[in-house]
Every structure is written in C-alpha cells, then in structure tokens.
Image (cartoon, helix red, strand yellow):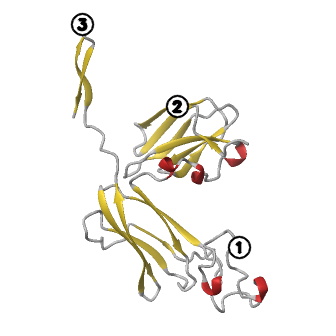
Amino acid sequence: MTNVLITDNIDSLLAYPLPDVPGLWCVTFRSHNPGMYHQLYANGALVAWTDTTDQRAFLVEAADCPTELTITAVDPAKRTEDLSDHLPISLRRPGWVYRSWILRSVSYPRGSRLEVFDDHATGELDAEPITSMPAWPESLPRFAWGQDVFGRGALGYDGFLAPGLGKGAFGAGMFGFGVDLISTSIPLPEEGMHRIVFRVTTPDGTQVETQLENIRSAPPPLPPDAFYVSNYEPQTGLLTLHIE
C-alpha cells in the first residue's frame, strides 16, 4: 500500500520574485519521484499542482503573512485533491495559522454572513472583520423546518437535504441530524495571544457571537535586512558573517 502523498526525495526548493511581474513568485524544486505529479501547499492549504509529471516549478502570488511552503508527490488521479489531512501535523498546522470548523446552523437565514474578528494580540478587537463569508451560500440547500421535502428523509423525517452520514458534524443539527461545517484558516502574523471572535450577522442586522477562542501565535522571525561575508581567514578557516 502506497502513501497518499510523498514528501521524501524532494529537495532544492527555491522561491524568488519575478522582476517583471510584481507580487508574483516562482517556486522551483527537484524531485526524484518519477511518474508522479506534484502539489504545492502554503501554510498547509493546497494552492497549486503540476500539469505534467516533469514540471518542476509553480507560480504563486505573494502573501502578506509568513508562508511555509510544502511540495508533495502524488498519483495522477489525486493531483487536484486537497490532501492536507495527510500531511505531517507540523506541516499541516504552522504555529501562526489558526484553523477552525464552525457549525453551519440552519437557524441562520439566507443572507447571513459569518465574520471573524481578531485583536492582533493587542487586547482590542478590530472594528472590521479580517474575513467574511456567507453563512448559507445560495448554492447550498437548506433543511430547516418547513424548508425541506416533507417526509423524504431517513425514517420519514424532513431531512432529505441534510448532509449524509460522515459528511458533517454527526448529530449537531436540529432533531439530531448531521450539520455542515464551515472551515476557516486564519493567519496570525503578530506574535502573542490572540482573541478570535466568530460572529454571525443576519440580514436584519442581528449579530450573534458563535465562538470565542484565545490562540497563541508563534510566527517565524523576520528575514534579515542584510546577510553577507565580512571576513575570512584562510589560515584558520574562520568565516565571519554579517547579519542585520
């Protein structure tokens, strides 16, 4: 039985900005996994994949927060699938990225939005959310009371449009149905303890705080402004580096 994805035999990872295209970076690598396609994960999330087995470069947009890049080798049939759950835990969840899953409650009417607020480790929440998304997208069917197909669900319940077994939070919905989950991934570039608040705003302006988290963020240090060799002594082999 082979692994779903492979991180071994991949090296020489190099990322550099394209001088003619501001905000765009090229990521190159070397892989000794013949016949396999490759995926690029940024902070544990799938962002790109190769179109051929011999492609060894990705083009990615610059991010405004620290980004950890991971390249994996996968079978052709898996190249477009997000396989982040199979990454080692240290690569799946960097110390400065907060991931959470919120219940998509049918009590939220159409037009409601889930908003996420952060205090940036200052103790005071921002007035504006750092991210916002529909609580119930128009393309997603609802199974609230009176909004489902009468008696078409399992055992004659009106849960015909509810998520199937294993496709949501089991038993967390009304009448013990499963319920869909909203996945969020939030970078926290400021070091320290962050206060994260999830808030649902309905079309009539009603606001309900659904979750409160205190998360400690430990981002990597900033890159040096300058790094060069300041002295070398051939007799002793002593190399002196200058870092600013």
Q: Position of residue 60 (x, y in %)?
A: 49, 45
Is residue 173 or residue 160 the one in the foreground? 173
Q: Give residue 46's position: percent from left, percent from top.
A: 55, 51
Count how many numbered circles sit on residues in the image.
3
Where does label 3 land, which residue? 235
Which three-letter amino acid code belongs to the residue tagged 1?
A: Gly
Q: Is residue 94 left or right of residue 83?
A: left
Give, as a three-letter code, the residue at label 3: Gln
Disc with the residue nearer the chain's start (3 vs 1): 1
Helix, strand or loop status at disc 1: loop
The residue positioned 67% from the left and 43% from the top of the image is 3
Q: Nearer the viewer, residue 155 or 14?
A: 155
- Residue at the image point whose x is 67% and y is 74% from the top: 163
In which quadrant is the C terminus drawn? Answer: top left
Q: Measured along the vertical axis of the image, is residue 237 above or below residue 77? A: above
Do we see residue 138 in this rendering? Answer: yes
- The secondary structure type at the circle numbered 3 is loop
Residue found 24% across the figure and 65% down from its top:
122
Residue marked by disc 1: 164
Q: Nearer the viewer, residue 211 or 187?
A: 211
- From the top left corner, tell me how far across and down residue 143 is, in percent: 65, 84
CA gap, disc 2 to disc 1?
Answer: 41 Å
